Amino acid sequence: TKIHQFLQDLPKCEHHVHLEGCLTPELMFTLAARNGVSLPDTEKRPEFSSPATLYERYEHFTSLDDFLSYYFIGMSVLQQQGDFEALAWEYFQKAHADGVHHAEVFFDPQEHLNRGVAFDTVVSGFVAGCRRAEQEYGMTTKLIMCFVKHLPASDAQKVFDLAVEAGHFESGALHGIGASSSEVGPPKDMFKEIYATAYSKGIRRTAHAGEEGDPSYIRAALEAYKSQRIDHGIRLIDSPSLLQQVAKDEILLTVCPVSNVKLRCFDHISKVPIRTFLDAGVRFSINSDDPAYFGGFILHNYCSVQEAFDLSIAEWRTIAENSINGSWVEQERKSELL
Ligand code: ADE
Ligand code: ZN
């Protein structure tokens, strides 16, 4: 339809996609075989029998933690530099087809290091995927390293130190830090020292907050982390005062509507606070989160929002402009995209 073509053509920026969340069951099985990694015993876990049975299981996530249990098993097949590069490249091909011009992508190094994969293997593989997307598609890309909340903060500190010592933030190999994984349970400010160091070095900061957790998680990300963006942030609907502050401070929320329904944050896309955010002047971008697990990439998210909210062309232009302006990219590139 006409609106679908309009959404396809809209110059999109993606700010919230986990590269490990782009691992399709097909690639998972291929890499497991190639690398000799065993997936769970199918006697006990029949959903690991084939890509088809995994896809079926992915239709029934009950929570963020239920999803994460699959996400962390899936990524265990990634072993060699070429695996990380192939994963990133698969994502960029899909993103390009969906009309993404600029992508800022997350990855979770701690999980890979814990499995004995070298930090450099992970980073150089993902960087190679990014450079290929830049060369073949003229996309701009940025890598954001996430710390995971279910592992000790000391592990996060180690990986941050490795990145700083390797000069990855200065060279531009890495562009910022984030925090992801389980929300309710781990301390809200567990990476406070790392974020303070990042702030003092001028390293960009974002953090997942207010996905399953209440608005106090968002307040902690803004205050304890001096986070410049909030990933998800949907529970802002429970705090009108914080919502006003986020609007006034022009903090960009990276919203993932399909993810929110798949992980049972809302029972339908129409409950995602798109209208509330637009009306309150809260800036947000629309993103895919873990597209291989949630059944669709960024354009699927744009189209699902359109079906539920019937936005005007002017509202879509506002969303596209806010996501360009909220990107961590040079002003010159923003002007090109606007
Ligand atoms: N890691 C991958 N996807 C995530 C999500 N939706 N929330 C928190 N951590 C994640
Ligand atoms: Zn996420």
Image (cartoon, helix red, strand yellow):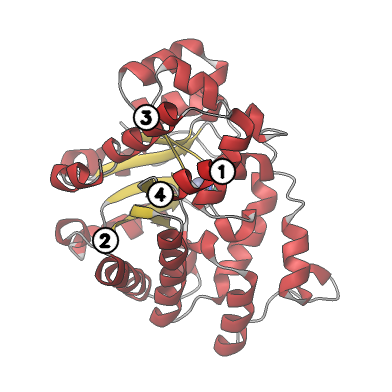
- Give the amino acid at mark 2: Ala
Q: Most extreme residue toward the top, as rendered?
A: 241
Instruction: Find disc 2 in the rendering and name its residue.
Output: 163
1 vs 2, front mark: 1
Q: Nearer the viewer, mark 4 or mark 2?
A: 4
- Which structural element holds mark 2? helix
Q: Residues within 10 Å of mark 1 (few under 14, many from 20)?
A: some
Q: Which residue is mark 1?
A: 303
Of callouts 3 and 1, the N-terminal one: 1
Q: Are marks 2 and 3 in contact (CB under 8 Å)?
A: no
**Residue underneath mark 3:** 318
Q: Residues within 10 Å of mark 4 (few under 14, many from 20)?
A: few
Q: State the CA–CA distance, disc 4 to disc 1.
A: 12 Å
Q: Residues within 10 Å of mark 2 (few under 14, many from 20)?
A: some
Which one is nearer the viewer's eye here, 15 or 305? 305
Q: Amino acid at mark 1?
A: Cys
Image disc number at residue 9: 4
**Which label lies toward us, 4 or 1?**
4
